[in-house]
Image (tube, rainbow, N blue to C red):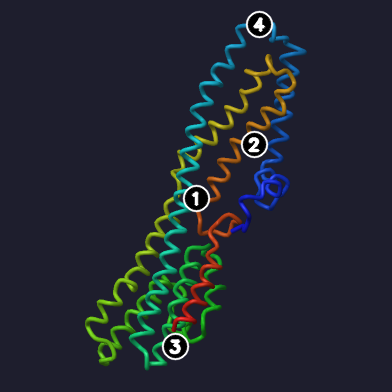
Amino acid sequence: MISHNPKDWITFIFRFHRSDTVRRLFPMIVLISLYSAGVAYLEIEIWQLSEKSHVRNVSVMHTLLGFVISFLLVFRTNTAYERWWEGRRLWGALVNTSRNLAMKLAALLRNEQEEKDFFRVMIPAYASALQRHLSSEDTRVELFDKLPKGLQEKLDNEKHIPNQIAALMYGRILSLAEQGKLSGDHLIFLNPELQSFTDICGACERIRNTPIPYSYSVFIKKFIFFYIMTLPFGYVFSLGYYVVPIVASIFYVLASLEIIAEEIEEPFGADENDLPLDKISRNIHMHIGELI
């Protein structure tokens, strides 16, 4: 995730980063500009359609369609941002759950250093494992090797790693209860945090595994394309060759909104505007080390 100062306008205007939509759309902007220039030249210089007033009515259609495409893009952007924000709320809940569980265990296991050492490793390991689980499956084996050696021996890399870590914590808690180190009331006291781990994981998986419907995404892209392709025909009469930069600018705005929506609708990836899961995981590791 890109760190920035939202009040610094000048830096935003003149700053271009790797994922900036200008860089990604630049080839298409050039093609749209050439296309618009070609249409303007044919209509003004060759066909001289500007003298035929009935052709001017084409611009009325674009005005009406402009309202439609605006509503579609607003809905598209809001839907994508809701997914991004829900993902951030879930990871915020994971931070609080990890802290609460650590504080409770530190109080209940005051004289059990071995048990505290176990949970000092396992609680941050869940956040790290969930981060890797939500990222590309191609990196799971590589990142699995970064877990503590003792933990690697207890986990199966081919299975759902966050579930395995949660199961190990559940098992350890029940073992402590059987040994008399924890009471039944303690189990009830700890259960909400233990259960929250799996609830958060399931909610994150729902976001990751449920993309925006394919037909809806394709329809918006086609709508933008045909809208832009017909713009020069409607406005070349009133704008002349100024239609070239204007059409290119309109394409940039519309296409940029769609690209931004595509990027933030999957908040658990590695794009620059995705959630800083690695930083959150490191913070959980640091906080748990301080609490236990």
Q: Which class describes the residues within 10 Å of circle 1: few (<14), some (14-19), or many (20+)?
A: many
219 horizontally vs 238: left or right: left
State whether residue 221 is above or below residue 57.
Answer: below
Q: Which residue is mark 1?
A: 265
- Please, which residue is most extreme toward the right here? 45
Quarter of the image that includes the C terminus: bottom left
Residue 53: horizontal and vertical position, in percent?
A: 63, 6
Q: Nearer the viewer, residue 85 or 55?
A: 85
Say if mark 3 contacts mark 1, CB within 8 Å.
no
Q: Which mark is residue 252?
A: 2
Percent across and percent down for residue 243 are 70, 23
Compared with 124, 83 (above or below) is: above
Per the rendering, the mark at residue 117 is 3
* Amino acid type, mark 3: Asp
Distance of label 3 from label 4 (alpha carbons): 83 Å
Q: Identify the element where label 3 is drawn.
A: helix
- Give SS at disc 4: loop
Read off the residue under disc 4: 52
Circle 2 sits in a helix, a strand or a loop, which is it? helix
Q: Amino acid at mark 2?
A: Tyr
How many residues crowd around disc 4 within 10 Å: few (fewer than 14), some, or many (20 or more)? Answer: few
Q: Secondary structure at mark 1?
A: loop
Residue kind at label 4, given as amino acid type: Lys
Residue 5 placement: quadrant: bottom right
Q: Give the mark nearer the N terminus: 2 vs 1.
A: 2
- Marks 2/1: CA distance? 20 Å
